[in-house]
Image (cartoon, rainbow, N blue to C red):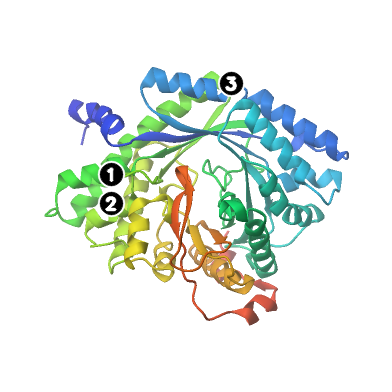
Amino acid sequence: MPFTDEEILETVRMIELETLDIRTTTLGISLFDCADPDLESSAEKVYAKIVHHAKDLVRIADSIAADYGVPIVNKRIAVTPISMVAAASGSHDLVPFARAMDAAAKEVGVDFIGGFSAYVHKGFTRSDDALFDSIPAALAETDRVCASVSLATSRAGINMDAVARFSDVILDTAARTAADGGLGCAKLVCFSNPVEDNPFVAGAHIGPGEGETVLNVGVSGPGVVRSALARLGPDADLLAVAETIKRTAFKITRMGELVGREAAKRLGTAFGIVDVSLAPTPAIGDSVADILELIGVDRTGAPGTTAALALLTDAVKKGGAMASSSVGGLSGAFIPVSEDQGMIDAVRLGALSLAKLEAMTAVCSVGLDMIAVPGDTPAATLTGMIADELAIGMVNHKTTAVRVIPVPGKGAGETVEWGGLLGTAIVQDPGKFSCAVLHRRGGRIPAPIQSYRN
């Protein structure tokens, strides 16, 4: 069925009234050729290469926003996982790489830089060990650096030794940034089945299969989908709801690809993917929770929420796939609790619990995202939360992630304000029962039998 002139012109309303935007233009930069036996030389190469390739990113993104009338909210950089770059130096302290990344990000004016990362889902190299040890100090000493680690895949299983160690990294990072409500942990995430072309922080990095440089775009439009469903009304059946979301996602994706290809052309780099993820903000009307409630639940977290989220995620992906052959990244719907006003309200009212959030992550893009827990949460409890989420990704062959923030000095039900995009979090109760034996056992949870498919 062809799209009408009226539908095309509708894009104007989406931008002006419904908070449609390009959430991020993320320039990926390979740093493999920055490896050097001398740590300081390698860090200097990292800084120089990032600045060389990204020096015009912000200017070009701003010029495209002005030319097309489409807001581009964030400009970001993603680099090769630093543990791979740093291996040649043999250093036990990789914080100098984080400082170089942070300085380069500030020099070129981007919001965040991702890639202080390691892949350890099957084991640790010496460089991976060094990166894990360096994460807390790196995130405490820098402003724009984000860190991520791969702890599980559907083919390797879950590295429980790495999960337990990552729990300690989280607690150390929270303690070092206690004055800011554990804010360092908001820049730290772990994955099952990470993708190599994710433009969204904190997990953005460029995998070893990517080119020298690549421009990836993340498009978001929960306000647009919300408005489309509000116009549809409560009497339409669920097939009509899905079709409305799909057609809306089509329009969002086409706009994202147009902007992404033009940005890549002006930067003189390759266009990679457009990630069509409904990523909320704390702004009123820009909420994934609001969409779920328009689909038909009283409050997000009520019975039916997981089914509504499954419909939403699938329809967004179908609309994106229809609009572009370059849809990638994560794509679907994000549910970061502190960044979504509707989610915050649902937690405050008691409708949305950690258990329900975990169930929801089985059908959406990522996982337990921006979850605040008490500052005295034991490492074993964090290990259990992370392992549960990674298991969902491992068994279902999908990307899942955990970004959990122990808030020093705060208990369940208290509120922490981070401001800006990170929003407000109500500290959630992870429960009084532990999994200390599971935490101590270590080893690996084997991959499911499906992993033998080739």
Q: Which residue is mark 3?
A: 56
Q: Quadrant of residue 114?
A: top right
Q: What's under tag 2, amino acid-wise?
A: Ile
Residue 276 placed where, x, y %?
Answer: 41, 42
**Secondary structure of residue under mark 2:** helix
Rounded to the nearest angstrom, the CA distance separating label 2 from label 3 is 37 Å
Q: Which residue is mark 1?
A: 225
In primary-sequence order, the first of circles 2 and 1 is 1
Q: What's under tag 1, amino acid-wise?
A: Val
- For the question of whether residue 72 can be seen, the reply is yes
Rounded to the nearest angstrom, the CA distance separating label 2 from label 1 is 7 Å
Residue 126 appears left or right of 306: right
Tag 2 and tag 1, C-beta contact below 8 Å: yes
**Secondary structure of residue under mark 3:** loop
Label 2, residues with CA under 10 Å away: few <14, some 14-19, many ≥20: many
Q: Which residue is mark 2?
A: 291
Residue appearing at x 43%, y 68% in the figure: 354
Residue 158 placed where, x, y %?
Answer: 62, 67
| Above or below: residue 353 compared with residue 309 | below
**Secondary structure of residue under mark 1:** helix
Label 1, residues with CA under 10 Å away: few <14, some 14-19, many ≥20: many
- The extreme left residue here reads 235
Q: What's under tag 3, amino acid-wise?
A: Asp
In primary-sequence order, the first of circles 2 and 3 is 3
Residue appearing at x 73%, y 39% in the figure: 99
Towards the viewer: 2 or 122: 122
| Above or below: residue 392 compared with residue 113 | below
Residue appearing at x 28%, y 37% in the figure: 18
Tag 2 and tag 3, C-beta contact below 8 Å: no
Residue 3 appears left or right of 396: left
